Amino acid sequence: MKEILLNIESKETRLATLVDRRLQELVVERKKNRQITGNIYRGRVTNILSNIQSAFINIGEGENGFIHISDIVENTQKFQELFDMDFDWDYDPSSFQAKESKENDISKILKPEQTVLVQVVKEAIGSKGARLTSNVSIPGRYLVLLPNTSHRGVSRKISDPGMRDRLKQIIRSFEMPTDMGLICRTASTLASTDQLVEEAHELVENWHRIIDTFQKADGPVCLYRESDLIKRAIMTALDKKFNRILIDNQQTYATCLKMYNRYKDEDQTLKIEYYRDTIPMFKKFNVEREIERALARKIWLPSGGYLYFDRTEAMYTIDVNSGRSQKNDGPSDVEETLVKINMEAAEEIARQLRIRNIGGLIVCDFIDMRSRKNQRRVLDRIKEAMKDDSAKCTILGMSEFGLVEMTRQRSKESLMQTLFTDCPYCTGKGIIKNFESVSIELERNLRELILQYGESALEVFIHPQLDHFLEHTDKKYLEKMAIKMNASINFKLNDMLHLNNFEIFSSITGKQLEY
């Protein structure tokens, strides 16, 4: 059974993907750092870097965005990477690309203070600004509009020759501006001709609105916002044939039903349900426990082996250890035991990479195996486990030392980067949760104590620095939240507490409450 859990809270939205009730993927999105990949902006060039053929562009989203000359000239490969697809074109893309890429001096294309229309293709991470492109694309459910190029193609993931020919004929017959292109996505196989025509016109109208806003705007501004996490959840569930979406917020539940009704004819099996239990949804489905595991350095495996996750400036390293696993006496049995641990490790590594959203260069140090055949078995297992990853992954072979190098597309901050900040106690050598994360946990625990356990009067002891943060952000909200649930909260200070810790007592009995 495949299902999506949507947990909606005042400052955070979390999406958990479960397969047979086991967490496979996690997305955490907060109001202040919502995903901007796919957004289109009216930007202003602030600086030209001729030595690396790049420019910085102010798009009004904090750090300036970054654009390379390869993201300005026509580049078909960029479209394929952006949509994680291979496209079948009606021409030779390499010949077109060679012709269009003759201009190799960015200073002849862009000038300081120039106004430009750009799209975000990669999130800002840390101090690095967003990666931008001028090769704009506007995705729909079935089609992708390419406003600046006349290419028309069909996804290679559509393998049926008859369906491919049908789709090619349809998009060639569209009455559209000759300088605009279209791509048929995999989901287009489920659409009728009328639906495809309707969506094509919608996308063109969206583009015209973007241009109108661009011409009327003054200064950097967002012209078009890509689908939010809620809509992406619906599209994912439809594309990957999920059984259920479970939502713990009434308003979001109604929104999802409305979105789903538009595509209901495609899929009658998806159920969208409202979660009504007083036990927090992520706690009931053991997602909270899995998140805590994903924040730990050490992960135990069923066989007794374990993994160590470590991050350096250049890469992530994952070390596989035999741990408490039981080894038999015979040499062949020892080898098979090590293979078993490595197989388990391969599955868990792929899952943890998705949950933790680790990107960039990753080196996995598996336990040494003598047999090349066994090395291939483990390598095949990790490649198979990574197939369902939504991020683009490249996996190299296994070295003689049992090392596997891989890269995983870094589209946004990792789970660690989202939830934690540098620790003031150790000058940045370690990390603690930021105050926003503690505030969200406090809200979650207060809600649980009031709703599930019927507590009506609570005293919350917190560190003075956390109190200062709450005073300017969430304290009034938490107090109002309690009043709505017929309860009261009284905050008190304790400078002996860790910055991440808080203690909750019952005002009636005086006893400390467990949560």
Image (cartoon, rainbow, N blue to C red):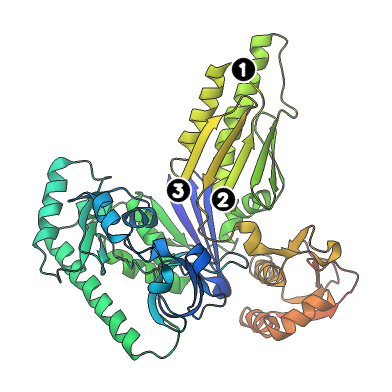
Specify whether 496 is left or right of 108: right
Residue at horizontal 15%, vertical 66%?
A: 197
Viewer-nearest residue: 447 or 423: 423
State which tag comes first along the sequence, 1 or 3.
1
- Identity, as a three-letter code, of the amino acid under mark 2: Gly
Q: In which quarter of the image is the N terminus?
A: top left
Residue 185 in percent (x, y) is at 26, 55
- Where 15 falls versus 211 (above or below)? above
Residue with the mark numbered 2? 360
- Identity, as a three-letter code, of the amino acid under mark 3: Lys
Residue at horizontal 12%, vertical 64%?
A: 194
Viewer-nearest residue: 331 or 7: 331
Label annotation for residue 336: 1
Report whether residue 83 is seen: yes
Disc 1 crowd rating (10 Å Cα; few below 14, some 14-19, many 20+) is some
Residue 314 in percent (x, y) is at 65, 50
Report whether residue 507 is seen: no
Spatial CA span between label 3 and label 2: 11 Å
Residue at horizontal 80%, vertical 66%?
A: 501
Viewer-nearest residue: 49 or 139: 49
Residue 6 in percent (x, y) is at 49, 62
Looking at the image, is mark 1 or mark 3 nearer the viewer?
Answer: 3
State which tag comes first along the sequence, 1 or 2.
1
Looking at the image, is mark 1 or mark 2 nearer the viewer?
Answer: 2
Secondary structure of the residue carrying tag 1 is helix
- Which residue extends farthest top? 330
Q: Do the residues labelled 3 and 2 touch (CB within 8 Å)?
A: no
Residue with the mark numbered 3? 392
State which tag comes first along the sequence, 3 or 2.
2
